Image: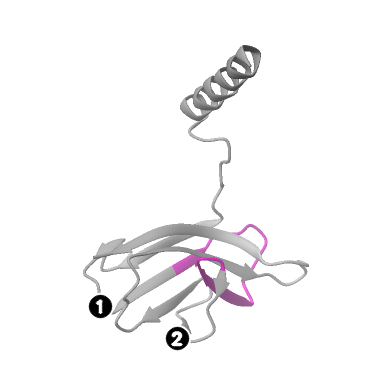
Amino acid sequence: MNQVTIQWDVVITLYIFFNWCHGGITNINCSGHIWVDPATVFKMGMNISIYCQAAIKNCQPRKFYFYKNGIKERFQITRINKTTAQLWYNNFLEPHASMYCTAKCPGYFQETLICGKDIFSG
């Protein structure tokens, strides 16, 4: 029993050490930028826009995709220009959502991650 407790203490210590040293075990390198208008924290019930701008090497995005909490959004997406798209929400009522966007590049088999951001309303 004592040996199991010591092993868990070592595992927890190593986990904390790696998080502290490396800013987390998983690092995501964005291939562009995502931002929220008016801000990432906003009043519940507001209309918000989420913008996604691709900066993918050797890619002129054919199509942009937005995901909220891992679910692909199908409506209210507008292409702004060759590298930027907008997702618009009317009366956003969720207290928290994880957003990310991807792009479909010609010649690429899968969607390419552009970036992600957590948003909060309250």
Q: Is residue 102 left or right of residue 19?
A: right
Q: Amino acid at mark 2?
A: Gln
Question: Looking at the rendering, which quadrant does residue 70 occupy?
Answer: bottom right
User: What label sits on residue 60 in the rendered view?
Assistant: none
* CA distance separating discs 1 and 2: 17 Å
Question: Which residue bears the numbered disc 1?
Answer: 45
The single residue placed furthest to the bottom in the displayed view is 75
Magenta stretch contains residue 58: yes
The single residue placed furthest to the left in the displayed view is 43
The residue positioned 52% from the left and 79% from the top of the image is 73
The residue positioned 34% from the left and 66% from the top of the image is 36
1 and 2 marks in contact (CB < 8 Å): no
Q: Is residue 86 left or right of residue 73?
A: left
User: Where residue 20 sits: x, y (%)?
Assistant: 46, 26
Q: Nearer the viewer, residue 46 or 14?
A: 14
Q: Amino acid at mark 1?
A: Gly
Q: Is 53 located above or below residue 30 in the figure?
A: below
The residue positioned 64% from the left and 19% from the top of the image is 4
What is the secondary structure assignment of the residue under circle 2? loop
User: Magenta stretch?
Assistant: 52-70
Mark 2 Cα shell of 10 Å, populated few (<14), some (14-19), many (≥20): few
- What's the colour scheme? one colour
User: Where residue 45 sits: x, y (%)?
Assistant: 25, 78
| Quadrant location, the C terminus | bottom left
User: Where residue 43 sits: x, y (%)?
Assistant: 21, 69
Magenta stretch contains residue 95: no
Q: Is 14 located above or below residue 60 in the figure?
A: above
Question: Which residue bears the numbered disc 2?
Answer: 76
